[in-house]
Image (tube, grey):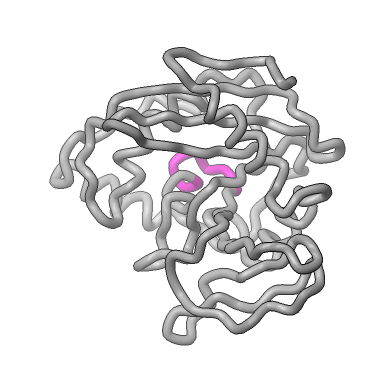
Amino acid sequence: MTLLNLNWPTSPEKAVRLQQELVSKIEHTPRLNPIRYVAGLDVHIRDEMGRAAIVVLDIETLKPVDAATAIKPMNFPHKPGMLIFREGPVIFEALKRLDIWPDLLIFYGQGIAYPDKIGLASYLGALIDLPVIGCARTQTYGDHRKVPFRRGTYTLLRDNGAVIGAALRTRDGGNLLYVSPGHRLNLKTSIRYILMCCRHHAIPETNRWSKLFLGRVNTDVVRNNYK
């Protein structure tokens, strides 16, 4: 939790050393504590202002139990492979405002399905040492074969033969989700938790709630208002 007060670098030159440290900390072997709370996290940037929303759900009921949002100016330039330093400050501001800390985080973005196999979900997981899954509705990297019609089926997402994620069907005939492990999870475990969180919709309840709250972000935190 002390890393939530990280002194973020403001230039690519200053960020390189921290980036190298984070790469060495990223794990892809499952290391999970019992999962009681799962959170969804989403970020949107507009007019150089970053908006983040995180909603914590009970893993059994998939009902929200806590939520927080934040808005901050973007103080880091847009550089490929360094998105964590651009979006990280507003993400951490939202995380600091939570009363209930999640056991698992599903981030609307990429884990290892990214150039150099290190996406924002991986960096974020390494920073807070929390299991993080990358989950998105758009394919940004890699290739996969056609996915069968039935819920729970998937085909592997590959980059030059290396497995970097999966294209997953969460509803019969529904749109695909692109899932990749971020930190402290492998692909099989990541898929299992994504399907667990997709009971009524094609996207996980975590993502659905975080997108809903992201639309409410204005100038301050939004909390404890789940209706």
Which residue sits at x=65%, y=54%? 31
Q: In this view, does 147 lie above or below 134?
A: below
Q: Residue visible at 52% across and 39% down?
A: 42
For residue 121, above or below residue 143: above
Q: Is residue 16 magenta?
A: no
Residue 187 place in picture, x, y as percent: 63, 66
Front residue of this view, candidates 7 and 42 = 42
Closer-to-camera residue (169/223): 169
Q: Where is residue 182 in the image (x, y as percent from the top left)?
A: 53, 56
In terms of image quadrants, where is residue 224? top right
Residue lying at the far bottom in this picture: please name it.
161
Question: Which quadrant holds residue 219?
Answer: top left
Queried whether the magenta region covers residue 130, the answer comes back as yes
Outermost residue toward the right? 61
Q: Where is residue 196 in the image (x, y as percent from the top left)?
A: 79, 52
164 left or right, relative to 212: left
Measuring from the top left, give residue 76's x and y in whole percent.
Answer: 22, 37
Number of disc labels = 0
Q: Give the range drawn in magenta.
A: 125-131
Kindly identify the residue that appears in the image at 46 percent across and 75 percent down: 142
* Vertical arrangement, residue 80 with respect to residue 71, above or below: below
In the image, taking residue 20 as reference, residue 139 lies left or right, namely: right
Instruction: Tell whether 197 sits left or right of 182.
Output: right
Residue pictured at 59% horizontal, 27% vertical: 213
Q: In which quarter of the image is the C terminus?
A: top right
